Image (spheres, grey):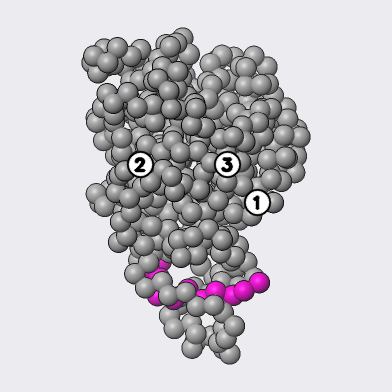
Amino acid sequence: MTAYLITDASIVGGEVADLLLDNGEIVAVGTNLAESIKGGPADAEIIDAAGLIALPGLVDLHTHLREPGREDAETVLTGTRAAALGGFTAVFAMANTDPVADTAGVVEQVWRLGREAGYADVFPIGAVTVGRQGTQLAELGAMADSAARVRVFSDDGDCVWDAALMRRALEYVKAFGGTIAQHAQEPRLTKGAQMNEGALSGVLGLQGWPSVAEEAIIARDILLNHHVGSKLHICHLSTKGSVDIVRAAKKRGLEVTAEVTPHHLLLTEDLASTYNPVFKVNPPLRTKEDVEAVREGLADGTIDIVATDHAPHPVEDKDCEWSAAAFGMLGLETALSVVQHAMVDTKLLTWAEVADRMSYRPAAIGQISDHGQPLVAGAPANVVLVDPAAQREIKSAESASLSRNTPFHGMTLPGKVVATFLRGEPTVLNGQAK
Protein backbone atom coordinates (compact mmCIF):
# COMPACT_ATOMS: atom_id res chain seq x y z
CA MET A 1 0.00 0.00 0.00
CA THR A 2 1.37 3.39 -1.04
CA ALA A 3 1.61 6.15 1.54
CA TYR A 4 0.32 9.58 0.52
CA LEU A 5 1.44 12.91 1.92
CA ILE A 6 -1.17 15.60 1.26
CA THR A 7 0.44 18.99 1.73
CA ASP A 8 -1.03 22.41 2.51
CA ALA A 9 -4.71 21.45 2.52
CA SER A 10 -7.29 23.56 4.33
CA ILE A 11 -8.77 21.14 6.88
CA VAL A 12 -12.58 21.43 6.57
CA GLY A 13 -12.06 24.98 5.34
CA GLY A 14 -9.97 26.06 8.34
CA GLU A 15 -6.31 25.68 9.23
CA VAL A 16 -3.81 24.68 6.56
CA ALA A 17 -1.99 21.45 7.32
CA ASP A 18 -0.47 18.30 5.88
CA LEU A 19 -2.02 14.86 6.18
CA LEU A 20 -0.04 11.64 5.99
CA LEU A 21 -2.09 8.64 4.92
CA ASP A 22 -0.62 5.17 5.37
CA ASN A 23 -1.89 1.67 6.02
CA GLY A 24 -5.51 2.81 5.83
CA GLU A 25 -5.20 5.49 8.51
CA ILE A 26 -4.41 9.15 8.88
CA VAL A 27 -0.98 8.74 10.49
CA ALA A 28 -0.34 12.39 11.21
CA VAL A 29 -1.79 15.87 10.73
CA GLY A 30 0.45 18.90 11.04
CA THR A 31 2.75 21.34 9.28
CA ASN A 32 5.88 20.46 7.35
CA LEU A 33 5.34 16.75 7.96
CA ALA A 34 8.01 15.78 5.44
CA GLU A 35 10.63 17.32 7.72
CA SER A 36 9.06 16.93 11.15
CA ILE A 37 8.29 13.20 11.11
CA LYS A 38 11.27 11.21 12.30
CA GLY A 39 12.93 9.64 9.29
CA GLY A 40 10.44 11.39 7.01
CA PRO A 41 7.84 9.67 4.82
CA ALA A 42 10.49 9.10 2.18
CA ASP A 43 8.40 6.67 0.16
CA ALA A 44 5.16 8.67 0.32
CA GLU A 45 3.62 10.03 -2.84
CA ILE A 46 3.23 13.76 -2.37
CA ILE A 47 0.02 15.52 -3.38
CA ASP A 48 0.13 19.30 -3.45
CA ALA A 49 -3.22 20.44 -2.02
CA ALA A 50 -2.54 24.17 -1.84
CA GLY A 51 -5.84 25.96 -2.35
CA LEU A 52 -7.82 22.77 -1.77
CA ILE A 53 -10.17 21.90 1.08
CA ALA A 54 -9.82 18.53 2.81
CA LEU A 55 -13.09 17.00 3.99
CA PRO A 56 -13.83 13.63 5.54
CA GLY A 57 -15.14 11.20 2.94
CA LEU A 58 -18.78 12.02 2.25
CA VAL A 59 -21.54 9.60 3.26
CA ASP A 60 -24.82 9.34 1.33
CA LEU A 61 -27.70 7.86 3.29
CA HIS A 62 -29.98 7.65 0.24
CA THR A 63 -28.68 6.14 -3.01
CA HIS A 64 -30.35 3.96 -5.63
CA LEU A 65 -27.84 1.57 -7.20
CA ARG A 66 -30.51 -0.49 -9.04
CA GLU A 67 -28.58 -3.77 -8.80
CA PRO A 68 -29.94 -6.43 -8.74
CA GLY A 69 -32.61 -6.17 -11.40
CA ARG A 70 -32.15 -2.88 -13.26
CA GLU A 71 -28.56 -3.05 -14.40
CA ASP A 72 -29.61 -1.13 -17.51
CA ALA A 73 -29.95 1.96 -15.29
CA GLU A 74 -27.07 1.47 -12.85
CA THR A 75 -24.86 -1.15 -11.24
CA VAL A 76 -23.08 -1.15 -7.93
CA LEU A 77 -19.83 -0.64 -9.84
CA THR A 78 -20.96 2.33 -11.93
CA GLY A 79 -22.91 3.90 -9.07
CA THR A 80 -20.02 3.73 -6.63
CA ARG A 81 -17.64 5.09 -9.27
CA ALA A 82 -19.99 8.08 -9.63
CA ALA A 83 -20.04 8.32 -5.83
CA ALA A 84 -16.25 8.46 -5.63
CA LEU A 85 -16.15 11.21 -8.27
CA GLY A 86 -18.58 13.13 -6.07
CA GLY A 87 -16.37 12.72 -3.00
CA PHE A 88 -18.33 9.90 -1.34
CA THR A 89 -16.59 7.02 0.38
CA ALA A 90 -19.78 5.35 1.66
CA VAL A 91 -23.30 5.06 0.27
CA PHE A 92 -26.47 3.46 1.61
CA ALA A 93 -28.25 1.52 -1.13
CA MET A 94 -32.04 1.70 -1.12
CA ALA A 95 -34.11 -1.47 -1.16
CA ASN A 96 -36.20 -0.93 -4.32
CA THR A 97 -34.24 -3.44 -6.38
CA ASP A 98 -35.58 -6.50 -8.20
CA PRO A 99 -35.78 -8.68 -6.20
CA VAL A 100 -36.50 -6.27 -3.39
CA ALA A 101 -33.87 -6.15 -0.65
CA ASP A 102 -36.25 -7.59 1.94
CA THR A 103 -34.24 -10.68 2.96
CA ALA A 104 -30.81 -11.36 4.39
CA GLY A 105 -29.75 -12.98 1.12
CA VAL A 106 -30.42 -9.93 -1.04
CA VAL A 107 -28.84 -7.38 1.31
CA GLU A 108 -25.75 -9.56 1.60
CA GLN A 109 -25.53 -9.71 -2.20
CA VAL A 110 -25.58 -5.92 -2.46
CA TRP A 111 -23.05 -5.59 0.37
CA ARG A 112 -20.64 -8.01 -1.33
CA LEU A 113 -21.00 -6.28 -4.70
CA GLY A 114 -19.95 -3.07 -3.00
CA ARG A 115 -16.88 -4.68 -1.50
CA GLU A 116 -15.91 -6.07 -4.90
CA ALA A 117 -16.37 -2.74 -6.70
CA GLY A 118 -13.95 -0.95 -4.38
CA TYR A 119 -14.92 2.64 -5.14
CA ALA A 120 -17.06 3.23 -2.04
CA ASP A 121 -18.36 1.13 0.80
CA VAL A 122 -21.96 0.06 0.22
CA PHE A 123 -24.34 -0.37 3.14
CA PRO A 124 -27.68 -1.88 2.12
CA ILE A 125 -30.94 -0.46 3.41
CA GLY A 126 -33.48 -3.19 4.01
CA ALA A 127 -37.13 -2.95 3.03
CA VAL A 128 -39.62 -2.40 5.84
CA THR A 129 -42.29 -4.60 4.27
CA VAL A 130 -42.23 -7.71 2.10
CA GLY A 131 -41.85 -6.66 -1.51
CA ARG A 132 -42.35 -3.05 -0.38
CA GLN A 133 -46.06 -3.84 -0.62
CA GLY A 134 -46.97 -2.30 2.73
CA THR A 135 -48.87 -5.28 4.10
CA GLN A 136 -46.41 -7.47 6.03
CA LEU A 137 -43.16 -6.72 7.85
CA ALA A 138 -40.03 -7.97 6.09
CA GLU A 139 -37.28 -10.02 7.75
CA LEU A 140 -35.95 -7.05 9.71
CA GLY A 141 -34.15 -9.10 12.36
CA ALA A 142 -32.55 -11.44 9.82
CA MET A 143 -31.25 -8.50 7.80
CA ALA A 144 -29.92 -6.88 10.97
CA ASP A 145 -28.09 -10.11 11.90
CA SER A 146 -26.71 -10.71 8.39
CA ALA A 147 -23.17 -9.99 7.23
CA ALA A 148 -24.50 -6.67 5.90
CA ARG A 149 -25.54 -5.68 9.47
CA VAL A 150 -28.49 -3.60 8.26
CA ARG A 151 -29.52 -0.82 10.64
CA VAL A 152 -31.68 1.37 8.38
CA PHE A 153 -34.92 0.17 6.80
CA SER A 154 -37.07 1.91 4.21
CA ASP A 155 -39.71 1.20 1.57
CA ASP A 156 -38.45 4.31 -0.26
CA GLY A 157 -40.43 4.90 -3.40
CA ASP A 158 -43.46 3.86 -1.39
CA CYS A 159 -44.74 5.10 1.94
CA VAL A 160 -45.45 2.78 4.85
CA TRP A 161 -48.90 4.34 4.96
CA ASP A 162 -50.59 1.91 7.36
CA ALA A 163 -50.21 3.45 10.82
CA ALA A 164 -50.46 0.12 12.65
CA LEU A 165 -47.78 -1.44 10.44
CA MET A 166 -45.53 1.60 10.86
CA ARG A 167 -45.92 1.33 14.64
CA ARG A 168 -44.93 -2.36 14.57
CA ALA A 169 -41.89 -1.58 12.42
CA LEU A 170 -40.72 1.08 14.87
CA GLU A 171 -41.24 -1.31 17.77
CA TYR A 172 -39.38 -4.13 16.05
CA VAL A 173 -36.22 -2.18 15.16
CA LYS A 174 -36.08 -0.63 18.62
CA ALA A 175 -34.84 -3.99 19.92
CA PHE A 176 -31.52 -3.62 18.06
CA GLY A 177 -31.35 0.17 17.74
CA GLY A 178 -32.44 0.31 14.12
CA THR A 179 -33.98 3.22 12.24
CA ILE A 180 -37.06 3.40 10.01
CA ALA A 181 -36.52 5.85 7.14
CA GLN A 182 -39.92 6.94 5.89
CA HIS A 183 -40.84 8.01 2.37
CA ALA A 184 -43.44 10.54 3.50
CA GLN A 185 -46.21 10.43 0.91
CA GLU A 186 -49.86 9.80 1.70
CA PRO A 187 -50.78 7.76 -1.43
CA ARG A 188 -54.48 8.66 -1.31
CA LEU A 189 -53.58 12.34 -1.66
CA THR A 190 -51.11 11.85 -4.52
CA LYS A 191 -52.86 9.43 -6.87
CA GLY A 192 -51.89 10.43 -10.40
CA ALA A 193 -49.87 13.42 -9.11
CA GLN A 194 -47.25 14.80 -11.48
CA MET A 195 -45.84 17.97 -9.90
CA ASN A 196 -46.25 20.31 -6.93
CA GLU A 197 -49.86 21.35 -6.41
CA GLY A 198 -50.43 25.06 -6.91
CA ALA A 199 -51.31 27.70 -9.47
CA LEU A 200 -48.62 26.46 -11.86
CA SER A 201 -49.88 22.87 -11.90
CA GLY A 202 -53.30 24.23 -12.88
CA VAL A 203 -51.83 26.32 -15.69
CA LEU A 204 -49.77 23.40 -17.00
CA GLY A 205 -52.63 20.92 -16.72
CA LEU A 206 -50.62 18.51 -14.57
CA GLN A 207 -52.12 16.70 -11.58
CA GLY A 208 -51.03 18.46 -8.40
CA TRP A 209 -49.05 16.90 -5.54
CA PRO A 210 -50.07 18.73 -2.34
CA SER A 211 -47.57 19.57 0.38
CA VAL A 212 -49.94 18.17 2.98
CA ALA A 213 -49.45 14.66 1.56
CA GLU A 214 -45.87 14.81 2.88
CA GLU A 215 -46.56 16.79 6.01
CA ALA A 216 -49.41 14.59 7.26
CA ILE A 217 -47.24 11.45 7.21
CA ILE A 218 -44.34 13.22 8.92
CA ALA A 219 -46.59 14.49 11.70
CA ARG A 220 -48.21 11.07 12.17
CA ASP A 221 -44.91 9.22 12.27
CA ILE A 222 -43.34 11.64 14.73
CA LEU A 223 -46.26 10.98 17.06
CA LEU A 224 -45.96 7.21 16.56
CA ASN A 225 -42.25 7.31 17.17
CA HIS A 226 -42.70 9.35 20.34
CA HIS A 227 -45.16 6.74 21.57
CA VAL A 228 -42.81 3.85 20.76
CA GLY A 229 -39.50 5.49 21.67
CA SER A 230 -37.66 4.30 18.59
CA LYS A 231 -35.68 6.03 15.80
CA LEU A 232 -37.37 7.75 12.86
CA HIS A 233 -35.68 9.30 9.83
CA ILE A 234 -37.56 11.40 7.27
CA CYS A 235 -36.42 10.91 3.67
CA HIS A 236 -36.14 13.80 1.17
CA LEU A 237 -38.08 16.44 3.13
CA SER A 238 -39.24 19.09 0.66
CA THR A 239 -41.75 21.60 2.08
CA LYS A 240 -41.80 24.53 4.47
CA GLY A 241 -44.52 22.84 6.49
CA SER A 242 -42.39 19.72 6.87
CA VAL A 243 -39.50 21.81 8.18
CA ASP A 244 -41.82 23.46 10.71
CA ILE A 245 -43.12 20.08 11.93
CA VAL A 246 -39.64 18.60 12.37
CA ARG A 247 -38.37 21.78 14.06
CA ALA A 248 -41.23 21.65 16.58
CA ALA A 249 -40.56 17.97 17.27
CA LYS A 250 -36.88 18.59 17.90
CA LYS A 251 -37.68 21.44 20.27
CA ARG A 252 -39.69 18.89 22.26
CA GLY A 253 -36.66 16.60 22.35
CA LEU A 254 -38.18 13.90 20.12
CA GLU A 255 -35.84 11.48 18.36
CA VAL A 256 -36.32 12.26 14.69
CA THR A 257 -33.81 13.03 11.94
CA ALA A 258 -34.40 14.36 8.44
CA GLU A 259 -32.68 14.78 5.12
CA VAL A 260 -32.94 17.13 2.15
CA THR A 261 -31.72 16.47 -1.38
CA PRO A 262 -29.42 18.78 -3.34
CA HIS A 263 -32.10 19.35 -5.97
CA HIS A 264 -34.63 20.50 -3.38
CA LEU A 265 -32.03 23.00 -2.14
CA LEU A 266 -31.72 24.62 -5.56
CA LEU A 267 -34.45 23.84 -8.10
CA THR A 268 -38.09 24.99 -8.09
CA GLU A 269 -41.39 23.88 -9.61
CA ASP A 270 -41.01 26.49 -12.38
CA LEU A 271 -38.83 24.02 -14.26
CA ALA A 272 -41.89 21.82 -14.83
CA SER A 273 -43.13 24.44 -17.28
CA THR A 274 -40.56 23.09 -19.76
CA TYR A 275 -42.34 19.71 -19.68
CA ASN A 276 -38.84 18.19 -19.64
CA PRO A 277 -39.16 14.94 -17.66
CA VAL A 278 -35.62 15.31 -16.30
CA PHE A 279 -37.27 17.64 -13.75
CA LYS A 280 -39.88 15.06 -12.70
CA VAL A 281 -39.00 13.78 -9.25
CA ASN A 282 -40.58 12.32 -6.11
CA PRO A 283 -41.25 14.37 -4.02
CA PRO A 284 -41.73 17.05 -6.66
CA LEU A 285 -39.77 20.24 -6.98
CA ARG A 286 -41.50 22.80 -4.78
CA THR A 287 -41.85 26.60 -4.60
CA LYS A 288 -39.19 29.22 -3.99
CA GLU A 289 -40.59 29.63 -0.46
CA ASP A 290 -40.09 25.91 0.18
CA VAL A 291 -36.51 26.08 -1.15
CA GLU A 292 -35.73 28.95 1.21
CA ALA A 293 -37.27 27.03 4.11
CA VAL A 294 -35.28 23.84 3.55
CA ARG A 295 -32.09 25.86 3.20
CA GLU A 296 -32.84 27.54 6.52
CA GLY A 297 -33.68 24.17 8.06
CA LEU A 298 -30.40 22.67 6.93
CA ALA A 299 -28.49 25.70 8.18
CA ASP A 300 -30.01 25.67 11.68
CA GLY A 301 -29.79 21.88 12.08
CA THR A 302 -33.50 21.11 11.86
CA ILE A 303 -32.63 19.08 8.78
CA ASP A 304 -29.74 16.86 9.80
CA ILE A 305 -28.18 15.84 6.52
CA VAL A 306 -27.97 16.19 2.77
CA ALA A 307 -28.75 12.94 0.94
CA THR A 308 -28.67 12.65 -2.83
CA ASP A 309 -31.62 10.34 -3.62
CA HIS A 310 -29.48 9.44 -6.65
CA ALA A 311 -32.09 7.83 -8.92
CA PRO A 312 -30.71 6.68 -12.28
CA HIS A 313 -33.06 5.73 -15.12
CA PRO A 314 -32.36 4.46 -18.64
CA VAL A 315 -32.99 6.89 -21.50
CA GLU A 316 -36.27 5.30 -22.56
CA ASP A 317 -37.75 5.86 -19.08
CA LYS A 318 -37.03 9.58 -19.16
CA ASP A 319 -36.99 10.56 -22.85
CA CYS A 320 -40.75 10.47 -23.24
CA GLU A 321 -43.85 12.52 -22.43
CA TRP A 322 -43.97 13.90 -18.89
CA SER A 323 -46.89 11.78 -17.65
CA ALA A 324 -45.22 8.52 -18.72
CA ALA A 325 -41.73 9.39 -17.46
CA ALA A 326 -40.18 7.85 -14.35
CA PHE A 327 -39.63 9.96 -11.24
CA GLY A 328 -36.01 10.62 -10.27
CA MET A 329 -32.74 12.47 -10.83
CA LEU A 330 -29.02 11.73 -10.65
CA GLY A 331 -27.20 13.30 -7.74
CA LEU A 332 -23.94 11.70 -6.63
CA GLU A 333 -21.49 13.55 -8.88
CA THR A 334 -23.05 17.00 -8.40
CA ALA A 335 -24.17 16.97 -4.74
CA LEU A 336 -21.17 18.73 -3.24
CA SER A 337 -21.16 21.42 -5.95
CA VAL A 338 -24.86 22.11 -5.42
CA VAL A 339 -24.37 22.36 -1.66
CA GLN A 340 -21.45 24.76 -2.19
CA HIS A 341 -23.57 26.87 -4.54
CA ALA A 342 -26.75 26.88 -2.45
CA MET A 343 -25.33 26.86 1.08
CA VAL A 344 -21.62 27.72 1.29
CA ASP A 345 -21.36 30.49 -1.29
CA THR A 346 -24.50 32.04 0.23
CA LYS A 347 -22.88 31.97 3.72
CA LEU A 348 -25.57 29.67 5.11
CA LEU A 349 -23.05 26.92 5.91
CA THR A 350 -19.33 26.79 6.52
CA TRP A 351 -17.20 23.96 5.13
CA ALA A 352 -16.97 22.53 8.64
CA GLU A 353 -20.78 22.42 8.70
CA VAL A 354 -20.78 20.76 5.28
CA ALA A 355 -18.58 18.04 6.79
CA ASP A 356 -21.16 17.68 9.55
CA ARG A 357 -24.20 17.49 7.23
CA MET A 358 -22.59 15.30 4.57
CA SER A 359 -20.24 13.06 6.55
CA TYR A 360 -20.46 13.02 10.35
CA ARG A 361 -24.22 13.00 10.79
CA PRO A 362 -25.19 10.60 7.98
CA ALA A 363 -22.58 8.14 9.26
CA ALA A 364 -24.02 8.47 12.78
CA ILE A 365 -27.61 7.93 11.58
CA GLY A 366 -26.49 4.91 9.54
CA GLN A 367 -24.43 3.61 12.50
CA ILE A 368 -21.16 3.13 10.64
CA SER A 369 -18.06 3.87 12.71
CA ASP A 370 -15.35 3.71 10.06
CA HIS A 371 -16.74 6.67 8.09
CA GLY A 372 -17.73 10.16 9.08
CA GLN A 373 -14.76 10.73 11.37
CA PRO A 374 -12.83 14.00 11.84
CA LEU A 375 -9.53 14.33 10.00
CA VAL A 376 -7.25 13.58 12.93
CA ALA A 377 -4.38 11.17 13.51
CA GLY A 378 -5.63 7.63 14.01
CA ALA A 379 -8.86 8.12 12.03
CA PRO A 380 -9.65 6.03 8.93
CA ALA A 381 -8.05 7.61 5.88
CA ASN A 382 -11.32 8.47 4.14
CA VAL A 383 -10.56 11.88 2.69
CA VAL A 384 -11.79 14.06 -0.15
CA LEU A 385 -9.93 17.04 -1.62
CA VAL A 386 -12.08 19.76 -3.15
CA ASP A 387 -11.14 22.76 -5.26
CA PRO A 388 -13.72 25.37 -4.19
CA ALA A 389 -12.51 27.89 -6.77
CA ALA A 390 -13.17 25.62 -9.74
CA GLN A 391 -16.11 26.20 -12.03
CA ARG A 392 -17.47 23.40 -14.19
CA GLU A 393 -20.25 23.02 -16.69
CA ILE A 394 -22.31 19.92 -15.97
CA LYS A 395 -22.62 17.68 -19.02
CA SER A 396 -24.86 14.66 -18.79
CA ALA A 397 -22.82 12.74 -21.37
CA GLU A 398 -19.79 12.87 -19.08
CA SER A 399 -21.49 11.20 -16.12
CA ALA A 400 -19.90 8.05 -14.69
CA SER A 401 -23.42 6.74 -14.12
CA LEU A 402 -24.98 4.46 -16.70
CA SER A 403 -27.86 6.94 -16.83
CA ARG A 404 -27.99 10.54 -18.01
CA ASN A 405 -30.94 12.05 -16.12
CA THR A 406 -29.17 14.90 -14.35
CA PRO A 407 -31.30 18.03 -13.86
CA PHE A 408 -28.13 20.14 -13.78
CA HIS A 409 -27.09 19.54 -17.40
CA GLY A 410 -25.87 22.80 -18.92
CA MET A 411 -25.53 24.56 -15.55
CA THR A 412 -22.20 25.92 -14.33
CA LEU A 413 -21.59 24.91 -10.73
CA PRO A 414 -18.73 25.72 -8.35
CA GLY A 415 -16.30 23.26 -6.85
CA LYS A 416 -14.65 20.11 -8.13
CA VAL A 417 -13.55 16.94 -6.39
CA VAL A 418 -9.83 16.58 -7.11
CA ALA A 419 -9.15 13.42 -5.12
CA THR A 420 -11.02 10.86 -3.03
CA PHE A 421 -9.29 8.36 -0.73
CA LEU A 422 -10.99 5.26 0.64
CA ARG A 423 -8.95 3.83 3.54
CA GLY A 424 -5.90 5.61 2.19
CA GLU A 425 -6.21 4.29 -1.36
CA PRO A 426 -7.16 6.79 -4.08
CA THR A 427 -10.41 6.07 -5.90
CA VAL A 428 -10.14 9.44 -7.65
CA LEU A 429 -6.94 11.36 -8.47
CA ASN A 430 -6.69 14.59 -10.45
CA GLY A 431 -10.44 14.51 -10.91
CA GLN A 432 -10.39 11.11 -12.63
CA ALA A 433 -11.64 7.79 -11.29
CA LYS A 434 -8.90 5.22 -10.89
The Cα atoms of the two marked residues, 1 and 2, are separated by 27 Å
How many circles with numbers are drawn on the protein?
Answer: 3
Give the image location of residue 340, x and y in percent: 33, 51
Q: Which residue is label 2 attached to?
A: 409
How many residues crowd around disc 2 within 10 Å: few (fewer than 14), some, or many (20 or more)?
A: some
Using the numbered discs, state the Cα–Cα distance from disc 3 to disc 1 in whole angstroms.
14 Å
- Kind of element beneath mark 2: loop
Which residue occupies 53% across, 58% down?
A: 433
Q: Disc 3 to disc 2, how far (Cα)?
A: 25 Å
Is 193 placed left or right of 38 in the picture?
A: left
Q: Earlier in the sequence, mark 3 or mark 2?
A: 3
Q: Position of residue 53 (x, y in %)?
A: 39, 64
Q: The residue tagged with tag 1: helix, strand or loop?
A: helix
The residue at the point 38 percent across, 46 percent down is: 395
Magenta stretch: give its range. 1-11
Residue 303 visible somewhere in the drawing: no
Q: Earlier in the sequence, mark 3 or mark 1?
A: 3
Q: Nearer the viewer, mark 3 or mark 1?
A: 1
Q: Which residue is mark 1?
A: 117
Residue 5 falls inside the magenta stretch: yes
From what the image shows, is residue 39 above or below residue 220?
A: below
**Secondary structure mainly formed by the magenta segment:** strand
Proximity of marks 3 and 2: CB atoms separated by less than 8 Å: no
Q: Is residue 83 rendered magenta in the image?
A: no
